[in-house]
Image (spheres, rainbow, N blue to C red):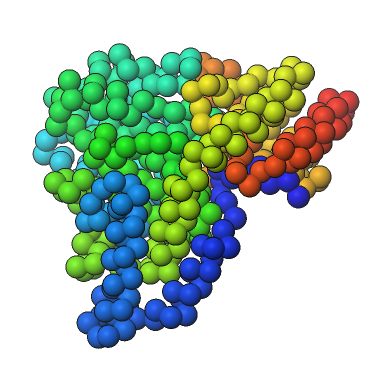
Amino acid sequence: MIYLDYSATTPVDERVLDSYIKVTREYIGNANSIHTLGSKSKELLIQATNQIAEILNCHPKELIFTSGASESNTTAIKGVAFKYKSRGKHIITSKLEHKSVLEVMGYLSNIGYDIDFVDICDNGQIDLHHLESLIRDDTILISICAVNSETGFKQPLKTIRQVINKKNPNVIFHSDLTQALGKTRFYLSDLDLASFSSHKIYAPKGIGLLYKKRDLNIDTLIYGTTENCPFRGGTPALPLIVAFSKAMRLANDKLDSNIKKCEKLKKELLKGLSKYPIQINSNDLCVPSIVNFSLIKIKSETFVHALEKYEVYVSTTTACSSLEESTVLKAISKGNKDISTTSIRVSLSHMTTIDDIHDFLEIFDKVWNELLLK
């Protein structure tokens, strides 16, 4: 099997799984309970939270555990929209966002909020001049992802913050950092809110994180809050939180070497693809772990299923939108369906080998010729 869909989800690291199993077996108490077992779980919860805070360079009380990035995105956007509606109902986002962001924007639009989409430049980054022109006195939120999940386009978060501060410093800045974690460097000091997910960094599914700056208030979406869960009701998912903490530490420790490895793999992949009449959509501004290209002559879904017969696994768009036309490439290509409906996403990892790339290219060639001859 050749797995090249790491941006959709990752296998669980054995070391992370060991932590999950150990906590599940040995820490049965609810961290909200006042008895000894509860106190033992609470101590471990605090320890794991502190470790994540240290890695992210933030305060532990700025971290809210969720079920995943989709919940974090929803909590951030609706939480701000409802809390600050008296200040204004104008929100700015982009077509680069994950479906969980785009759909909550659609919901807010339906109930009276004014949603603007910033233009995207040909290089995949947002148009900063257009962004500045969109910011108004009644703008309450800007949500721009740090890394696009389909193409790997990176956004200049620090510069975006500077544009916001220049035009209206009261605007709250949220970024979905799901595809940035473990793939590139970022700084939470540029943001007010940020979303993360564990299963993108070799931890189990079902746990996510929302960073919320301490002096920022948002509306609670899940009630039943406690001291340990002040903004999101529910029992702390301790085994998942500890596993997330372990995975984050492992990703942070090897960040530079993992990036370098993916750069080499990407270079080899692009070299092999260069002989085909396809369009490479990813560029030098992208994280090296994501390579997106359009086949032009072959529908992406057809190609993905053809590769699957050889036990090669890649994606079309994101896993949450895999049967839909790419909104990202549609925006960048100015509506060219030959590009937006034939795109393939190959996502790499430090676990990917050079042999995986060579084998993929060999099978790619077989499938390419098979489908063109039909």
Residue at the left extreme of this rendering: 86
Q: Residue at x 31, y 84 (%)?
A: 37
Quick check: 310 above or below 208?
above
Residue nearer the viewer, 42 or 135: 42
Q: Residue at x 57, y 51 (%)?
A: 10
Q: Quadrant of the C terminus?
A: top right
Residue 230: % across, % down:
21, 62
* Count of picture labels: 0
Residue 95: % across, % down:
43, 28
Residue nearer the viewer, 54 or 170: 54
Quick check: 48 above or below 350?
below
Residue nearer the viewer, 225 or 274: 274
User: Which image quarter: residue 273?
Assistant: top right
Q: Residue at x 44, y 28 (%)?
A: 154
In the rendered image, is residue 74 in sight? Answer: no
Q: Residue at x 48, y 15 (%)?
A: 122
User: Which image quarter: residue 113?
Assistant: top left
The answer to whether residue 289 is left or right of residue 246 is: right
Residue 347: % across, % down:
60, 38
Residue 351: % across, % down:
63, 47
In the rendered image, is residue 216 in sight? Answer: yes
The answer to whether residue 37 is left or right of residue 343 is: left
